[in-house]
């Protein structure tokens, strides 16, 4: 074999060097080589700037029986934003905007002179990402913004919110996790500076999960929050922590038999004070595609400022599906509860349900049959029992009803869902005590929103020991037409019966509640309308009532430029034992119209009438109109809003708002 000459070796070496340089040049996006040199990208890249100039004028006038106030504001803002990267956007990427401006205010209230002030306003929105595609990506943010909050039948709120934080992640295939730390500060008040509310919180969050072999999954979540709040003149230090550990084991390779374990620990301090530790174990056995059973054990320990409670529960159940039409389910359970204040209890329950669904001529038929039985004994309680952080939801327009025996209405306190804001009785809500229940009513024009979820604190008065047995029986059916002249019509009816017996040393305080409840209704969708009517009659030894419900919804696109929606609901209630009646009527509508592609208008209105022979009447109106004009980079928005509430128990209140914003983007 002939040996390569020196010139051949030199040619090969030169080719390798050239290829290396060429490959090196290709690693840099769009690099250009000139005579063997690489044009390197800049270390710092900067995206084109974007900005806007805006002018906002707001005027609000609010009147009530006790105070009259007016507020005017004029704001001028300049906003600039950009983004970019360092080395490359795969290394360090950032984007942000900053807003600076001036605000002038004029406020006046009854009995005082008009006060004027001015100040500097600032907003920002900054995001930074470090090595997003690496094994340890991290992100950082800082934000501050202002916005307005519309409250149902109430004056506008101005909200300022500041937040900053960081997150570090480890996207490992075996043990992914992240750590997030952030601070949030919220300030809310009406435009005239009244009704202030502040909340400041620091939070740490951690999450991780892993697969143990092919059949086990383990996850852990932890959150720690500290802070303080101040509203309605009441300040409170807040704190909470929550730890949740979940473990899932697929016993067999197909995943038909599953064991799920959960440990849930939570603690809160502040308005709501408690420690809670709950352990759940559930074994689910899917014997066939149509039959499965489950077995559950739970231990629930709760510690309150003056009492402790421990509940142990065992539950077993099954579900059987016969073809596609009949589903049978049942469960049995037994639980014991120990209380430091006395009143230890035990409860045994059983439940059986048959659900039938079948395609029938012209539609579909659904029916159910249910049977229930419960028996238990509760010992005498020597002192009042605390209930802390009970979660309830308003079903507007109805009040929240607490039916637990012995609830003391004078001890009820209401908070928002996170427990950070305390609502004010007789301003945001009112409490009514009855012999067999406690009702919590949302006041129109208050801070509580329609259908809001809230948390409650209250006491249960000492009760004598008793043994209670309850049996239930119910059945019902629903027929839905899917074709023919009655297409989309649904008819339904149900009957439920409860028989209860109580053995106690004080039968005057603890009375059984025997009831029979019948319900019948219809739903019909045709054209652009949805109509619902429903009648309910509850014949009860403690709290009988009759209810008649109507609702209608109309949605229509009147043309290529207009849309209309109208909602109407009405509820009639009768309370025979109290010789009382109540009526709730609500009507709302929205109309949107596009004059051109640049000019759009929206009009929204609502009215609410509550009539109650026991507690008086309330009438509320709310109207709002907005017009928006946008041409290229210029936008002008004008809005007017009016609210009016008159109540026989809390007097009259009204508010008027005018808002004009002019924005120019560049």
Image (tube, rainbow, N blue to C red):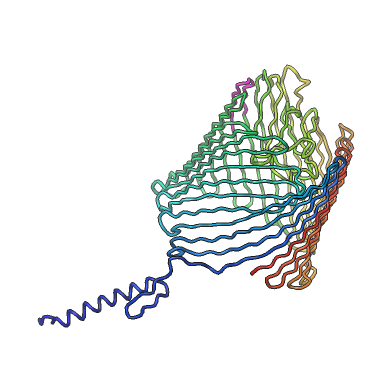
Q: Residue 430 at x, y = what percent?
A: 79, 36
306 in magenta = no
Q: What segment carries the magenta color?
A: 333-347
Q: In this view, does 595 lie above or below 92?
A: below
Could you tell me residue 516's position as x and y percent? 78, 36
Direction top: furthest residue:
505
Location of residue 184 in the rendering, given as x and y in whole percent from the top left corner: 59, 46
Quarter the N terminus occupies: bottom left
Residue 77 vertical position relative to residue 423 in the rendered view, above or below: below
In percent of width and height, residue 14 lies at 23, 78
Residue 129, placed above or below residue 492:
below
Q: Does the magenta stretch include residue 343?
A: yes
Q: In this view, does 259 lie to the left or right of 413?
A: left
Q: Which of 143 and 338 is in front in this view?
A: 143
Is 118 left, or right, of 276 in this rendering?
right
Q: Can residue 485 be seen in this view?
A: no
Q: Which of 559 and 150 is in front in this view?
A: 150
- Front residue of this view, candidates 224 and 402: 224
* Residue drawn at (40%, 75%) of the image: 31
Q: Residue at x 63, y 21 (%)?
A: 341
Please tell me in which quadrant of the rendered image residue 315 appears: top right
């Amino acid at each position: 074999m002939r040996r390569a000459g020196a010139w051949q070796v030199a040619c090969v070496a030169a080719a390798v060097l050239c290829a290396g340089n060429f490959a090196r040049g290709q690693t840099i996006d769009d690099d250009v080589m000139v005579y063997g040199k690489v044009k390197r990208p800049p270390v710092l890249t900067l995206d084109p700037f974007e900005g806007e100039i805006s002018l906002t004028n707001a005027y609000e006038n609010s009147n009530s029986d006790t105070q009259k106030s007016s507020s005017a504001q004029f704001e001028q803002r300049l906003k600039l934003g950009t983004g970019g990267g360092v080395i490359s956007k795969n290394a360090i990427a950032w984007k942000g905007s900053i807003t600076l401006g001036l605000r002038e205010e004029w406020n006046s209230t009854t009995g005082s002179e008009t006060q004027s002030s001015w100040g500097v306003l600032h907003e920002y929105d900054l995001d930074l990402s470090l090595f997003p595609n690496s094994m340890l990506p991290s992100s950082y943010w800082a934000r501050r913004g202002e916005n307005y909050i519309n409250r149902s039948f109430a004056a506008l709120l101005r909200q300022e919110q500041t937040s900053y934080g960081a997150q570090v992640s480890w996207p490992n295939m075996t043990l992914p996790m992240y750590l997030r730390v952030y601070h949030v500060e919220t300030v809310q008040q009406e435009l005239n500076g009244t009704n202030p509310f502040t909340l400041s919180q620091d939070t740490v969050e951690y999450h991780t999960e892993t697969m143990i072999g092919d059949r086990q999954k383990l996850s852990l979540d932890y959150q720690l929050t500290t802070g303080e709040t101040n509203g309605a003149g009441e300040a409170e230090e807040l704190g909470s922590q929550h730890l949740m550990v979940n473990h899932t084991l697929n016993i067999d390779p197909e995943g038909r038999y599953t064991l799920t374990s959960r440990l849930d620990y939570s603690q809160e301090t502040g308005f709501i004070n408690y420690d809670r530790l709950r352990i759940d174990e559930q074994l689910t056995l899917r014997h066939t595609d149509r039959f499965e059973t489950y077995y559950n054990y739970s231990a629930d320990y709760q510690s309150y400022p003056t009492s402790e409670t421990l509940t142990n529960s065992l539950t077993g159940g099954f579900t059987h599906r016969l073809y596609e039409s009949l589903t049978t389910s049942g469960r049995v359970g037994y639980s014991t509860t120990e209380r430091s204040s006395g009143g230890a209890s035990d409860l045994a329950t059983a439940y059986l349900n048959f659900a039938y669904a079948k395609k029938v001529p012209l539609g579909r038929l659904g029916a159910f049959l249910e049977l229930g039985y419960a028996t238990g004994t509760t010992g005498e309680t020597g002192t009042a029992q605390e209930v802390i952080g009970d979660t309830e939801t308003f079903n507007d327009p109805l009040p929240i009803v607490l039916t637990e025996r012995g609830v003391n209405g004078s001890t009820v306190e209401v908070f928002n869902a996170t427990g950070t804001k305390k609502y004010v009785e007789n301003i945001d809500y009112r409490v009514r005590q009855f012999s067999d229940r406690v009702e919590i009513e949302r006041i129109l024009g208050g801070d509580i929103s329609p259908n809001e979820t809230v948390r409650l604190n209250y006491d249960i008065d000492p009760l004598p020991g008793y043994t209670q047995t309850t049996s239930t029986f119910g059945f019902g059916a629903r027929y839905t037409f899917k074709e023919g002249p009655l297409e989309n019509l649904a008819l339904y009816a149900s009957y439920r019966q409860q028989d209860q017996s109580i053995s106690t040393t004080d039968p005057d305080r603890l009375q059984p509640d025997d009831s029979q409840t019948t319900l019948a209704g219809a739903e019909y969708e045709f054209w652009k309308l949805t109509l619902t009517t429903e009648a309910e009659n509850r014949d009860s030894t403690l709290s009988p009532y009759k209810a008649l419900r109507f609702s209608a919804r109309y949605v229509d696109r009147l043309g290529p430029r207009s849309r209309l929606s109208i909602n109407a609901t009405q509820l009639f209630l009768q309370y025979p034992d109290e010789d009382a009646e109540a009526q709730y009527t609500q009507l709302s509508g929205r109309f949107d119209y596009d004059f051109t592609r640049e000019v759009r208008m929206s009009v929204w209105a609502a009215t609410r009438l509550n009539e109650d022979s026991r507690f008086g009447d309330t009438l509320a109106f709310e109207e709002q109109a907005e017009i928006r004009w946008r041409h290229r980079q210029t936008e002008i928005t004008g809005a007017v809003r009016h609210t009016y509430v008159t109540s026989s128990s809390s007097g009259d209140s009204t508010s008027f708002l005018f808002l004009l914003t002019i924005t120019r983007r560049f």
